[in-house]
Image: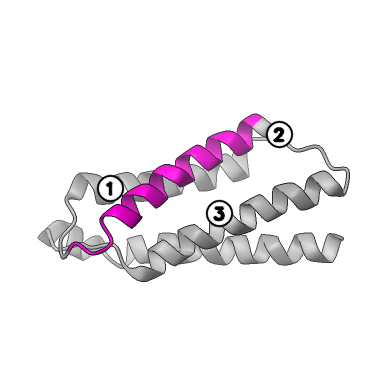
Amino acid sequence: MDVLIHLFVGLHIIGIAALLGGFLTQLKAIGAGTARFTPVMLHGALTMLVTGVALVGLNEADGHHVNSFKIGVKLLLLIVILGLVYVKRDEEKVDKAAFGTVGALTVANIFIAVLWT
């Protein structure tokens, strides 16, 4: 079971890297007002959602304690991220506030995962 959990953790990290990487590659475009949500950002967020749910299930099945409140906060942030990216994915230009919100919530999600014990 540990190998499966570690596999899903790795996939979860790949998802967050895709989401954050997509945001970071658009930093110049934010200043120019031409930033847009790329498909990799949507796929990264969806990967995070699927692997996160799988990780909670696998950890519960393996008898590990899961902090439900922490997972709920992370899920709420991810749903907001997914909503913004999904709704505005076809727009040629995304306003700075929406794009910045996705970046800030992504970084917040990372720090919640790492620092909240």
Position of the N terminus by quadrant: bottom right
Distance CA(mark 2)–CA(mark 3): 17 Å
Distance CA(mark 3)–CA(mark 1): 20 Å
**Which residue matches tag 2?**
67
Residue plotted at (79% across, 64% down)? 4
| Circle 3 SS class | helix
Front position in the image: 42 or 106? 42
Front position in the image: 116 or 46? 46
Question: In the image, residue 44 lies at what x, y percent?
Answer: 47, 63
Residue segment shown in magenta: 69-91
Residue 93, picture quadrant: bottom left
**Which residue matches tag 1?**
100
**Which residue matches tag 3?**
49
Q: Earlier in the sequence, mark 2 or mark 3?
A: 3
- Is residue 21 shown to the viewer in this render? no
Q: Residues within 10 Å of mark 2 (few under 14, many from 20)?
A: few
Question: In the image, residue 83 lies at what x, y percent?
Answer: 37, 48
Amino acid type for the residue under numbered disc 1 = Gly
Position of the C terminus by quadrant: top right
Q: Any magenta on residue 80?
A: yes
Looking at the picture, does residue 41 appear above or below residue 81? below
